[in-house]
Every structure is written in C-alpha cells, then in structure tokens.
Image (cartoon, rainbow, N blue to C red):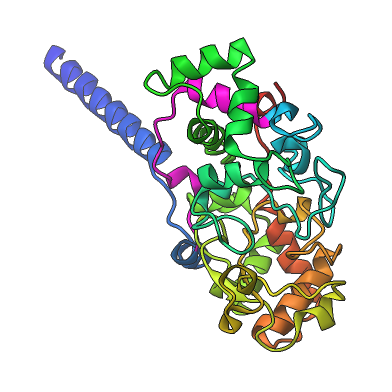
Amino acid sequence: MKSILSILIIAVFISCNSSSTEDTYAVKKVPEKSELNKQANTFFASVTQLEKKDLKEEKVNLGKRLYFDKRLSKNNTISCNSCHNLSTYGVDNLPTSPGDTKEFGTRNSPSVLYAHLHSSQFWDGRAKDVEEQAGMPILNPVEHSIPDSLYIVKKLKKIDNYVKSFNEVYPESGLTFENLTNAIGAFERKMTPVSQFDRYLDGDEDALTAKQKDGLKAFINNACITCHSGVALGGSMMQKFGLFGNYWEYTKSKKIDKGLAEVTVKSSDEYIFKVPSLRNITKTSPYFHDGSVESLEKSIKIMAKLQSNKDITEDEVADIISFLESLEADLDPEMKTL
C-alpha cells in the first residue's frame, strides 16, 4: 500500500512540475512577428537597438547648462533652446527663427531630438555631427552673433563655475571652444526617446492601432521609404526637393532657396536638401526647409507629387498621418529645464 502511495505522490509531483515548466515557457515565449512587422524591420530600426554610448554624466550636465545659457549669444538673448525648445519637441514652431540681433534666419529650425542619429547636420548638410553643428549657430552673425570662438571662450572664462566645470570634465585642456561644442553634443546625444513605433519594431504588435498599421502600409506602398527610412526615418541622405516639379510652385515659398548649391556653388547641387527625420513630425510644424507649409496633410500631398509623381488619396493621407503619430516621443521632464 505504501509503495502504491509513493508512486502516486511521485506522479503528481512530476505532473505539477511539468505543468509549471510549460507555464513558465508560455510566459517567456515571444510571439512571432507579423509579415508587416518583418517588412517594417527591413526599412526601419528601433532606437532601443542602438549601441549605448558611454557619456559621462558630468559632461552631459555641463552640456545641458550650456544648451540653456543665453550668455552664449553676444547680447545674452539667445540660447540653443531658444530655437530648439525642448519643451516643444526641440523646435520653436516658427517658419524661421529670430536671432540675437532680432533678425530672422532664412531656414526653418529643425528638431534637435534624434539629430545625433543623422548622417549630417543643417538643411545643406554642412556639419558632420551635432558637435560641429553646435558651434556654427554660436558664430553665426544672425543667430548668436558671437564674433569669433575666442570671444565666447573669454566671456565664459569670467564665470568661475564654468571654468571649474570645464577643468573637471576636460582636465587636459579646460575651457576651449572645441570642448564647449563637445559638451553640448554630449547632451544632445541623450535625446533619443522611445516611441510607439519603436515598441512595434521590437515585436509589440499591439503598439500600433489598426489605422496606424494601414498608415505604415501606405507609407511603404507610396515609396516614402525611398528617403525616409532607417532609425530616424530620414536624416541619412541628401535629395533634390522637386524631382517632378519646382517645389516653390507647390509650397508658395517666398524665396527660392538653392539648398546645397549655396554651399558648393555647383549648379548640379541646386535645390538639394538633407532629408528631414519624420520622428515627432506631427509636433514640429511648419514644414520644409523654409517652414512654408503649416499643414501636415498638405505637406504629405506635396511630397507625394513632387518626389514620387503620385496624387495620393485622402484616405491614404489620413492613414499616413495616423502612422506618423506613432513616431511621437517626448523627452524626460528633467531634460527640458535646468
């Protein structure tokens, strides 16, 4: 009798243990990605998959202080945050922005969020990275209007706290213009918030609604991926704006900007601009290099016509906008203010 009872107890134990193992496996098992998700992963990449850069907290904090400091302009009226406001997704929502002299620039201020993922900076791609970019507005006569790099270094060296911080972060060289832009760049490299679309690419099928998935299909089928692909959905190439027409006839731009040709002075580079990232595009109007179009719906139609020679339908536009909403992602609150 005891032998039979022992066998029953062992059988129950094995059965329970087997069930527990299966339940554990069921919880950990990752569902297979849909065909649309697999297709999306061939064109795009999640920010969660990016290699983490080892950025020292002290350097990032110094860059943050510099980013918000209006003393980086000649008349103490303009900071990096003035045109790239972190409280409004890294833009000022103006067609063009006023500088330290109250004069307006000629191009729209793009979002600083995700900018470090781009292959180059500015609409004409003249800076190779966010570190080089950070110094150019400071020395621009319309933007920060600082006369030269020595001027701003001398100005900041009168501020004991900055001298101390630069010596701590850059013990070998201290406060230099190169270190100033390097610190700002370090802060900007932290601006990579995770969106719904990133979670979808990572395998969460429920991260997008049915309408957003329809928009993703429309985005792919209408060849938007030709230029807007990769982790930033743009920012990785230069392209002529107006492959099938003159852009200013559609945007009603007040000025015909020749884009890259203004840097290279080559007629073959006329109307070529850096392809913008579409992350947070629903929050960063107005659109295009000159901020000439306020409506995202109109911008999509213009792009379809000028770049793909397509008359996109109203339903497709609505679906694409829904998909673009899945790219919205904001910074942590502590990054937005000092």
Looking at the image, residue 42 lies above or below residue 307: above
Q: Is residue 87 magenta?
A: no
Can I make out residue 199 in this image? no
Residue at the image point whose x is 87% and y is 72% from the top = 254
Q: Position of residue 146 (x, y in %)?
A: 69, 38
The C terminus: image quadrant: top right
Q: Position of residue 202 (x, y in %)?
A: 48, 49
Asked where in the image residue 242 lies, by quadrant, the reply is bottom right
Asked where in the image residue 73 lies, by quadrant, the reply is top right
Report the front residue among 331 and 123.
123
Q: Is residue 207 left or right of residue 288?
A: left
Q: Is residue 47 left or right of residue 86?
A: left
Looking at the image, residue 92 lies above or below residue 279: above
Report the front residue among 131 and 226.
131
Report the front residue among 161 and 315.
161
Looking at the image, residue 258 lies above or below residue 182: below
Q: Position of residue 48 (x, y in %)?
A: 47, 43
Q: Position of residue 153 (x, y in %)?
A: 58, 28
The N terminus: image quadrant: top left
Report the front residue among 22 and 275.
275
Asked where in the image residue 262 lies, by quadrant, the reply is bottom right
Can I make out residue 138 in this image? yes
Residue at the image point whose x is 77% and y is 38% from the top = 82
Count how many numbered circles sit on residues in the image.
Answer: 0
**Outermost residue to the left:** 3
Residues shaded magenta: 44-67
